[in-house]
Amino acid sequence: MLLHGLFALAPLPCPGHPGCAAVCDAMGPLLLALLLPLRGVSGLPFYNGFYYSNRPEGRNQGNGRSEGLFNGEKLIVETPEETLFTYQGASVILPCRYHYQPALVSPRPVRIKWWKLPENGAPELDVLVAIGPRHRSFGDYQGRVRLRQDSERDVSLEIQDLQLEDYGRYRCEVIDGLEDESGLVELELRGVWFFYQPRQGRYQLNFHEAQQACEEQGSVVASFEQLFRAWEEGLDWCNAGWLQDASVQYPITLPRQPCGGLGLAPGVRSYGLRHRRLHRYDVFCFAAALRGKVYYLEHPEKLTLTEAREACREDGAQIAKVGQLFAAWRFHGLDRCDAGWLADGSVRYPVAHPRPNCGSPEPGVRSFGFPNPQSRSYGVYCYHQH
């Protein structure tokens, strides 16, 4: 290694030197014999005439623990292994702590960075950076996030007034000089999926229209993980719908000919990634649990869609969205056999306890589709925010 370093620092004469050819002829075989074995020594990488150590400075331990080794000290960042569950509008703390092994005699300043990892190939989203008492938050997180720092080396992140878009994976990074280590925290909102098809009928939405449709109904486009979890719970749906990563999929528990054929095993069937603008399907939406209340408005008469909107306003509420009705059915046990208007012009009703003359024998939200808005055949479901 020393001999190689000397030759790297003292190169052979330039090609124009009169002794160049003779030296090369005499020394070439010797140099080749010396250098070739060195290239394999300890598997060290060779760059620009020198070897560099490939010993990792840090290693990801998994299970929410990451370590970095420098100056005889290990920087260790610890985050929880389990997924954190919460609901829309709540406040949540994403735990993150760090320490050194062996412990430092005197503390030194570090830089803390939190960011959210993308779900669909988008850039990472900065959430907060901090050095000592100074911190800065970004984007929609401004005014809603802060470091807890309840104890020494506690750099947990508090997020207030959780939004639907806040769920996902967050990275907590601790930077000490040139060294940094990080850990992951997974945040999941309690919610319910629902399949959405617009008034125009089946397979009418491109990806951007699907995003807008879910948003208008108080929800977001569901992720693959959310759809897969629903399939594990028994979801069987033969219509294909957009997911958050712009793939199109559908869950099947009972294989049958119209749904991919009898020869395929149960599972989540995929059409793969589709063109976001040109291809058209329905969409799987995800609605988080609510802080407000959805209720069937007791009214002396049946209402048109316009009258239904006005009736909710007069009651100090607003006409409920599809996602709100599904969340109320799933988490508040809303059970009503009366069909009522919703904000998108559809008519539905929630059944938590199936019974005769109340539709299917399975619990769920029943749909009457999109009747004529002038029809006076239905009541209305309203939503009041607490």
Image (cartoon, grey):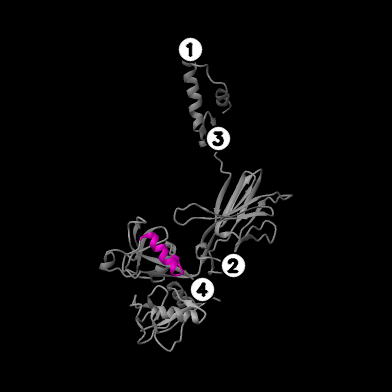
- Please state which amino acid type lies under the numbered disc 2: Ser
> Which residue is nearer to you in this view: 239 or 218?
218
Please tell me whether residue 273 is drawn above or below residue 356 in the rendered image.
Answer: above
Q: Secondary structure at mark 3?
A: loop
Camera-nearest label, 2 or 3: 2
Q: Secondary structure at mark 2?
A: loop
Check the picture and name the quadrant holding the N terminus: top right
Residue 300 is situated, as x and y percent measured from the top left of the image, at: 43, 89
- Ranked by sequence position, the earlier of labels 3 and 1 is 1
> Which residue is nearer to you in this view: 40 or 288?
288
Camera-nearest label, 1 or 4: 4
Q: Which residue is mark 3?
A: 52
Camera-nearest label, 2 or 1: 2
How many C-alpha atoms fall within 10 Å of the one at disc 1: few (<14), some, or many (≥20)? few
- Residue sitting farthest toward the top: 18
Residue 94 is situated, as x and y percent measured from the top left of the image, at: 59, 62
Q: CA distance from mark 1 to mark 4?
A: 85 Å
What secondary structure characterizes most of the magenta part? helix
- Ranked by sequence position, the earlier of labels 4 and 2 is 2
Please tell me whether residue 83 is drawn above or below residue 295 in the rendered image.
Answer: above
Relative to 125, is 154 on the left or the right?
right
Q: CA distance from mark 3 to mark 1?
A: 32 Å
- Please state which amino acid type lies under the numbered disc 4: Leu
Q: Which residue is mark 1?
A: 22
